[in-house]
Amino acid sequence: MSSSKKLVELFYDVVSPYTWLAFEVLCRYRNVWNIELKFKPAYLGGVMHVSGNRPPGVVPNKFLYMTTDLTRLSDYFDVPLSPPANPFEAMFEKGSLNAMRFVTAVAEKEGDVEVERVSRELWKRIWSTDQDITQPASLTEAGLKAGLSASQVEEFLTLAKSQPVKDKLKSVTDEALKHKAFGFPLIVCHVNGKPEVFWGSDRFELMAHCIGEKWVGPQPGKPTAKM
Amino acid sequence: MSSSKKLVELFYDVVSPYTWLAFEVLCRYRNVWNIELKFKPAYLGGVMHVSGNRPPGVVPNKFLYMTTDLTRLSDYFDVPLSPPANPFEAMFEKGSLNAMRFVTAVAEKEGDVEVERVSRELWKRIWSTDQDITQPASLTEAGLKAGLSASQVEEFLTLAKSQPVKDKLKSVTDEALKHKAFGFPLIVCHVNGKPEVFWGSDRFELMAHCIGEKWVGPQPGKPTAKM
């Protein structure tokens, strides 16, 4: 890491569709802005519980709006978001604890490339193709699609059930809570030794201003970029 | 109104700081985009109640974040936001019913210029100088600062207590609820005969894309514009 690069931490959970947008935008801007992007897989359920927050979708009008909002953003951000048939079941009944333990196991043993690919495959399952992310077979499929070998997947599935990985996921979640998290994405930019915390996938223009960079829309450098 | 101009309706209540940001941005872009901006003074308390939404500030971490977020946005948007010493008292205990009835009275008798000025003076009181907006003396002060005469202010104070004005405020609030409002600002863009609804002060880039215009940051045309 060059000393001039600003560290940007992304606390995330694949259960959150807005976080997928932020994840893809930061993966794109990693090569545009002078930043080091650090993935921090965490557990949104824990953050919601400890902070006393409740999902926005419990207000019917807000749920309706979010559906429209996500459809528009999916197009504008060029991220293939498509809500599962039963979002409440997918997000709250089934949840993401196993999936995020699996991502944590990958993060413990592999590098950013693998973490990025596995996370994206899991997001695709829950938020694009409406597939399960709780069962070992589902995690295996995501892992293989992400380019892991069968033996690696097996190793990470075992590791995901181990106490150190459970503890690790909890400690990263606690780290997010120390930054006063109440939801994801939580993006922490380290500027002049101070953490600047941003929540959501709609503060990139402000964030760019804060870290001395330029926001040119969600698809930088692409001919399809809208700005 | 030129037939090519797109109608953009802003449903607002001066009790909401994020709505002030949206109000100022739309007042600026009114001269940049090919739109007709229509002010729709409404009552946020009614929207929150009917939609079953609750204020974001009730989650302590979210309240903390909003304070930081508003400070940053105030600077970036160049809107002199400064939270009152006791936001809960100002927003929920004292509230904005009298203020929005007063604005409604102004809207019934005067044009957009007066509505804009009076709304801005009320926002300045609650969200910049920490002053009351519930008492007749407070509304008078705001009205005079906005350029109304003493006799106009008196007329609007009386009118604000009349049934037709109370009904009007309720009907505009109901109109917002028909657009499935759950909070303000609610911005309704009429595009090809279809209402496109946006919530918040952080969807302008997306909104511009939707109405075929260009977003160049919250301070268009100013040398201080950050983009």
Image: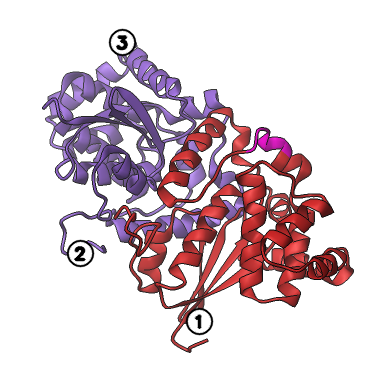
Chain colours: A red, B purple
* Badge 1 vs badge 2, beta-carbon distance below 8 Å: no
> A152 and A204: which one is in front?
A152
| Badge 3 element | helix
Q: Is residue B21 magenta?
A: no
- Amino acid on which the number 2 mark rests in the picture: Thr
Q: CA distance from mark 3 to mark 2?
A: 44 Å
- Amino acid on which the number 1 mark rests in the picture: Gly
Disc 1 crowd rating (10 Å Cα; few below 14, some 14-19, many 20+) is few
| Badge 1 element | loop
Query: Residue A88's x, y, as percent?
Result: 69, 36
Residue displayed at 65% across by 33% down:
A85
| Badge 2 element | loop
Q: Which mark is residue B224?
A: 2
Any part of residue B122 in sight: yes
* Residue beneath disc 1: A193
Picture layout, residue A87 above or below residue A16: above
